Amino acid sequence: MITTGARRWRDMPSVWPTNDPNYLRKASGPDDGDGIVPVAGDFRELQGTPWLHDHRFFFTAENVHKGMFAMCNYYSGPDRGSDRADRNNINLRLPSGNRLPWGNIDFDVNLVVSNPAMDKDGQLFFDIFDTDGFVGDLLLVNGSYYPYFEVLPRRYRFRIPNAAMSRFIKLALAVNKSLRFAPETPVPFYFIANDGNFVVSPIQLTQLDEQGVAERYDIVIDFSAFRPGDSLYFLNLLKQSDGRKPDGAVSLRKAFKGEEDPCVGPILEFRVVYSLKSVDDPSTTYTAESPDPSVDLSDSDWRTGRRTLTTQIPVMAPVRERVIEIRTVRRRGLAQEPGKAMHPRLRRHPDISMDDPRERAGGAHAQCKPHLGPYPQAR
C-alpha cells in the first residue's frame, strides 16, 4: 500500500493571495461589456497562451510534424484582449485592439514556429527511426517559409510557441533596413509571459532565451520608432545538428550572413506600413496616425515595480512524501496478514523474499522520506 501527500498545497484557497485589495476583481473573466465575471481561484494561475495538438499514442511527433496543432488564447479580467481600460481598472491594456469588448487580435498575434523537413520532391519527410530526436531543415512561421508580416508603427503583442519536435530556437529582433537605424541594429522588446503565465515585471531584451520544444514566450514589440517602408527581421540564432541538444548560439552578425544550419538566420520579416484594415472589424482601417491606447511598458512605474503584471507565486520544491507499507512475503511462500490481499504479481512470483528479521516477527513498516540533498556520486 502506498499513500502520498503533498507537504503543502499551493493551489488551495488557504494560500490564495486574498490580501491583495483587488483580489476579487483580478480573479475574473471578461464580460461582453467593459466589466468582469468573478471566477473563484488564484489570479496568479491565470492561463494565457496554451496550444493543442493530437496526442495519439506513438504518433504525437508525426502528427505535429504534419501541422496538426492549433493555439487557444485564454482571456481574463487582467488579460482581456483589449487595450482600453475597463470600468474595474483591472485590465492591463496589453496590445490587442478595442473593436471588440474582449479577445481582439488586431495587435495580439500568434506566431507558431515549426520545424518540418522536406524530401527531394518537396514533400514532408519524417524519420521514425531517429530515436535521438528528429530535426527538420526549415523553420516555418504559421506554416509559411520566410513570411512577412505588415505592422503599423505602434505596439504589438506576439505569442510564440515552439512547435518543433526536437529543435530548440533562440529568437532575436534586429533592423533589416531603415532610414534611421543601421542594418543589424538590435531592437529591444519586452518579455511578459511564458507557459508559466505572466512574469511579475516586464523584462527588456533584444534576444530571447533558448526556447525548448512546446515552450511559449509572449513578448511586446514597440514599432513606433520606425517609419513606413522600414523592415525588421526575427532571426533564429541557435544551431542544432541533431535532436539531442543544441550546438550553441551564433552572433547576430553571423545569423544575418547565414550558417551551415539552414534554420539559422531570418525566419520572419516585419514590414512597417502606413495603414492596415482591422481583422476584428473589417469596416475599420488603422493608420500610422491612429492613437495607441495600449500600455507603455517603458514607463518608470514598470521599471521600479510600482506596477506589475502579476504577483510572484511562492517557489516550492516539488517534493512529495510517500509512506509505504511493506507486506509479509517469503521465498516461495504466500504468508500474509489475515484478511489482507497480496498483489497478484507477488502471489505468482516465486522468488520474492524479504530477509529483514522484522518480517519474520509479523511484517514490516517503513516510511520513505524525500531526498533533499545532493545525490551521491556513482561508484
Image (cartoon, rainbow, N blue to C red):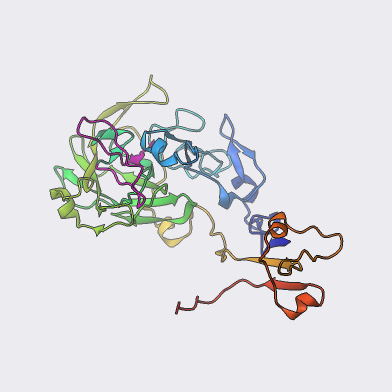
Compared across the picture, whether 313 is left or right of 67 comes to right
Q: Magenta region's main secondary structure? A: loop
Compared across the picture, whether 4 is left or right of 137 comes to right
Residue in front for this viewpoint, 267 or 206:
267
The answer to whether any part of residue 183 appears in the image is no
Up/down of 342 relative to 154, above or below: below
Question: What x and y, as percent, mark residue 5?
Answer: 69, 62
Q: Residue furthest right?
A: 338
| Quadrant of the snapshot with the C terminus | bottom left
Question: What x and y, as percent, mark residue 58?
Answer: 46, 41
Compared across the picture, whether 42 is left or right of 2 comes to left
Q: On the image, which quarter does residue 230 sit in?
A: top left
| Badge count | 0
Compared across the picture, whether 67 is left or right of 257 comes to right
Residue in front for this viewpoint, 217 or 277:
217
Q: Is residue 125 magenta?
A: yes
Range drawn in magenta: 108-137
Question: What x and y, as percent, mark residue 81?
Answer: 47, 37
Q: Residue at x 35, y 50 (%)?
A: 133
Q: Is residue 376 magenta?
A: no
Q: Residue at x 27, y 41 (%)?
A: 139
| Quadrant of the snapshot with the N terminus | bottom right
Residue in front for this viewpoint, 156 or 329:
329
Up/down of 9 relative to 182, above or below: below
The answer to whether any part of residue 163 appears in the image is yes
Question: What x and y, as percent, mark residue 308?
Answer: 49, 55
Q: Residue furthest top?
A: 283
Q: Residue at x 51, y 30 (%)?
A: 101
Residue in front for this viewpoint, 207 or 122:
122
